[in-house]
Structure formats: C-alpha cells, structure tokens
Image (spheres, rainbow, N blue to C red):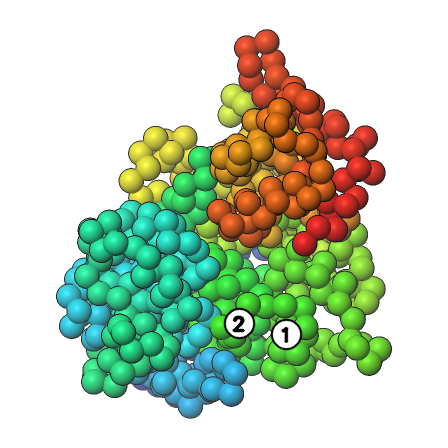
Amino acid sequence: MPVFRDFCPTNRTGENGLLAASSVLGPDFLWSRDEQSHFPRLATAKVERSQTDRMIVVADVLYSAPVGLPRTRVQKRFPEDCDLIKLPEIFNVTSIMVDRHVAQGRDAKVAIECGDEKITYRDLLENANRVGNLLRQLGVDLEQRVVLALMDSPEFLYCFFGAIKIGAVAVPVNPWLRAQDYEYLLNDTRARVAVVSESVLPEIQKLARDRVRCLKEIVVVGKNTAFANLNDLMKAESPELQAEPTSKDDMAFWLYSSGSTGAPKGCIHLHHDMVISSEAYAKGILRMNDSDRCYSVARLFFAYGLGNAGYFPLYSGATTILSPARPTPASIFTDIERYCPTLFFSVPANYAALLAHQRGDGKEFDLSSIRHAISAGEPLPAALFERFKQRFGIEILDSWGSTETLQMVVANSPGEVRAGSSGKIISEYEAKIVDENGIAVPQGEIGQLLVKADSTCSGYWNQHEKNKATFEGAWFRTGDKYYQDEDGYFWYAGRADDLFKVNGRWLSPAEVEKVLVAHPAVREAAVIEREDRDGLLKPAAYVVLNASFVQSDALRRELQDWVGHELSSYKRPRWIEYLSELPRTATGKLQRFKLRELQKTADARLTSGEDAP
C-alpha cells in the first residue's frame, strides 16, 4: 500500500503544534492520542487499507510539538492515487537519523555499544559532525565519493553519516578484500578520500598511487602512524555542523553488488531511501522502538547489515551493538549473553553454524532476551527454521531483499511465519511474478520475480546496459525465480541465471572457473551450486585435468586452496569432482543441468570434499 509522508519544519510548540500538522495533513483529521511513541520532530502519515475499504492514516507529529508529546493518530480518506512519498525538496537524511535525537532529549541515551565503549546520541552527533568538518578540510565536495573500508565500529557510523551530512556520498566496502578489488572500487567511485581500518592497510599499500588516479587522502582508524589518524584529526574539528541542504533525491550512499560477470556494480541510493526502508520493515514488520537493542551478524558494509545495525536502530531511537571482530558461533553466543539484544539479525549459514555449536559445560546458551530473530541473504531452509525453534524457542523471520532495494521487500511477519517461504510482500511495496515475455503467471506457477519499491536504487553507476536490462520503469527485475501460494506467501525456486548466493553474497561461476583454469593441472572447469547438509548453497567444481596430472585428494585440496588464495573465501569450492570431459551441446555450450544430475550419484565420492576445510 502507498505511504504518505510530509515533513513539517515549524518551531511552534504545545497544542498549537497540532494546528501545524493540520495545515499539512488537512483540516478534517480526527485527532486522538496514543501513548506508544514520542517523536516531536517530524510529521508522517502511514496509509493503510482497513477492512471497510477506508484509508487509515497514522500521523506522528514532529517538528511541531515539544519533547514528550505522544503520538497523534488521525483518520482520513485518501485517494487511490495519493503520492507514495512526500518529502520536502530540501532534505538531508542525517537530520532524521542523527540530529533529531538530541533535540528530542535523547542526547544521553546510548546509541552504540562496542566492547566496553558506550556512545550516546550526543556523542554520535558531535563525532559525525567532526568527521563532516574533517572531510571538508580534506577537500571533499558535494557529491564526491568517500570510500569506507571499515570494521563494524562507532567510527563507521561517524564516517558514514558525516560524509552524507556534507552532501558527499558514503561508499562502504568490504574490509576483507584484496588489493586488486580496492583498486577497482577506488577507481570506479573516483573517491578522493578513503577511510580504512588499520587491518586493511596491507592491501591498500600494495596499490601504486598512479593506479588509483583520484585518491588524494588515506585516513586510518587504528594506531598506525604512517598515515593520517582519524581520531587524532577529529579532535581538531568542531562538533558543530550545519547539514548540507541536499535534495531528497540526491545521492547519499552507494552499495556494491556483484553481477553476472562477477564485477561489482555500484547501487546509487538516495537520501529518502533509508527512511522508506525503516518505516516499511523496522517499524512496519518488527515494530522496532527505542527500547530495542539490535545485534547483526551481517556486517555494516552489506545492505542487510547497514540497516540492521545502522539506520534501523538510529531511526527508531534504539541501541545498536557493534563488534569489529569477525563473528564466530562462540563469539556470537558470548555477545548475546553479554549485551542481551532484543533483535538478532543473521543469515542462514550462520544459523546453521550456531546450531552446530555447543557450550563446553553442557549448558544451553541464554537467548531469552531476543524477541525476534531475522534472516536474509539467501533462502532459509525449513529444516533450519524448525531446528532453531526447537532448540531455542525462537521463530526466525525469513525475508527477501537485495542491495538494489536496500532492505526487505518480502518478509515473514511475527506470528504469521510460514517456514521455508520468504513471506509476503510488505504492504508499502508491490511484487509480480512473470514469464519470459513479462506476462504474469498464474498463482502457483514459477516465474521471474519483479518488485516495485521506492527504496530501490536509482540505478547502477556507469552500467548503462545493465540498467536497461534490470530496471523497467519503477520495477526491478530481481533475477530470482519464485512462485506465490494461495495465501500470498512467496517461495524461492532458484535463479533466473546461473548465479547463486553463498552466505548471502552472489557468486559468479565464471569467475571461479577462470581461476581454476589458471592452475597448471586444470584443462576445463565448471562450477554450479550444490546444497550442503544444512540445505544451504555452496559452490561445487567439476574439472578436467591436463594429461600430465593424476587425480588425487591432495590435488583437490590444492585446487581449493588455489581458489581461496585468489578469491574471497566464500567462493572456494566446497567440493571438487574429476571428469574426463564436461557435458556440452553440439555447438560447444556447457550443459550445467547435466552436472546437477551427476550430483545425486556423486554424493558418496564427494563426502571427503564436504568435510574439507
């Protein structure tokens, strides 16, 4: 269903504030009070259809009321063609995500917990301002990109929102990439400044400066003294900063998503996108509020993690729990028991790892603080859902979203979970399943999933042909195959092409095949998806050896390590099978479906590969 928003910048207070909201929303609203929320800085109206075919409008009076004024509910009929989003033309999202909390009296509330460090909302505001001022001192101007290769930490959020506040474009990237990946990203973004964690420096230092033509400054978070230190530089900057008067449709941040060639694509997200995603999922589905504590296994540089541990809790006035360490089952359970999160976000592969982990003393882990566990990134097998629920008494809310849509578009709701499904379309969005000609398929039939969400990126940076193939007006062609049951639940049925997700990240078979063929032993290679014992997809490689090499388990491990050295670890084949030749058509095209058929008969021989490190 549509959502009507209107941000009303007025300084009037008290009951007169309702008059200010009335001037925006209309004089014939019926006012009543609801004590559940306190947002005195914004006027919003969420439009929903009631059973009586009336449009129900819920308005939060902000900017027009004093701190502590309760939520005001109003009812009014709206036309079917009302605007999806109505924001002022001049709108900087940091005013909602960061600045307003201090004005609302939430300045002493803890916004971020990281180790023993507790960051209040005032700390967040002042440090984001300092970073914004610093970036301006470093020559960053409107719309210029700032690459952030940072571990999850308070500094990530300072830099992310500090860049956005001055009208620059924050570009979070994976802090565990290799030098050639950073070279590509720095050149594609044309970033003038990169802020990196100290652990990223060894890869960054491999880059010849003449190969990254636009980069002028490297700022480091950590103790390294060879480069400018972020915390030292921040101390010299003012904690005051006026937000750049950006448009609601200005670029705010980019997130990179891999594609059919394996080359990352920059998804351009706008200032209004985070507000839309927060209202639709964090508020609409999870009912997130200022008493929530959010813990995300998915890191902040992911679209999924950026919402979970970044703008969702900040939008809701909640607390986010961050850790720069790479998560392991042991560390995750320790963090849950220490920080007592109420909302836990992870991916299916991690839920499987948690289920496989046991405490040394035989006692069960305490997850009693968690009111909802959320999964995304790849489909959650029903068996994993059932095992987790049986062990911990928690239902996992599986969902579907993408880097392009920023966050969830299809989701299971609390109390309405259907195990194995991705859930239903979120009310603010639309979805359709079509055949190869773009015609809607009958209910229950498999087709390609297209979604319409106003949080969807405006396009890919410098990817003209890919944009034409992916975006059809307001519709985003997801590349996923789905069917919808009679109750409106969406069920994943595979990819529309050969790509598949591993640990929530896209894997291009061609990229892995190229690395395998570069090994002296390999003549040909083909990679497909295969389910592991938990029902999660992992890469399986089929290789044809050169004549001078002999098939062996030792060579299997060598080929796995070869790929692991050249590419990210999740692209390392879990299984490697030897063939005398690859199945091909008469014209020489690889027949991947025949390799999938071989899997059923090859399971016994692949057992040793499944347990390979």
Of helix, strand and loop, which one carries label 1?
Answer: helix
Which residue is at a point 21% across and 70% down the rendered structure image? 135
Residue 87, how many percent across, how many down? 32, 59
Q: Amino acid at mark 2?
A: Ala
Closest to the observer, 442 or 65: 442
Q: CA distance from mark 2 to mark 1?
A: 9 Å
Of helix, strand and loop, which one carries label 2?
Answer: loop
Residue 490, how many percent across, how many down? 65, 43
Which residue is at a point 71% across and 38% down the rendered structure image? 552
Residue 521, how many percent across, how many down? 58, 33
Q: Amino acid at mark 1?
A: Ser
Above-or-below relation of 432 to 83: above
Is any part of residue 23 visible from this angle?
no
Whether tag 2 and tag 1 are in contact, CB under 8 A, the answer is yes
Determine which of the numbered discs, if any, sits on residue 325 in the image.
Answer: 2
- List the single residue furthest toward the bottom: 108
Task: Check disc 1 and report the residue beneath it.
Answer: 331
* Label 2 environment density (alpha carbons within 10 Å; few <14, some 14–19, many ≥20): few
Which residue is at a point 24% across and 80% down the rendered structure image? 233
Residue 499 relative to residue 195: left or right: right
Determine which of the numbered discs, if any, sits on residue 92 in the image.
Answer: none
* Label 1 environment density (alpha carbons within 10 Å; few <14, some 14–19, many ≥20): few
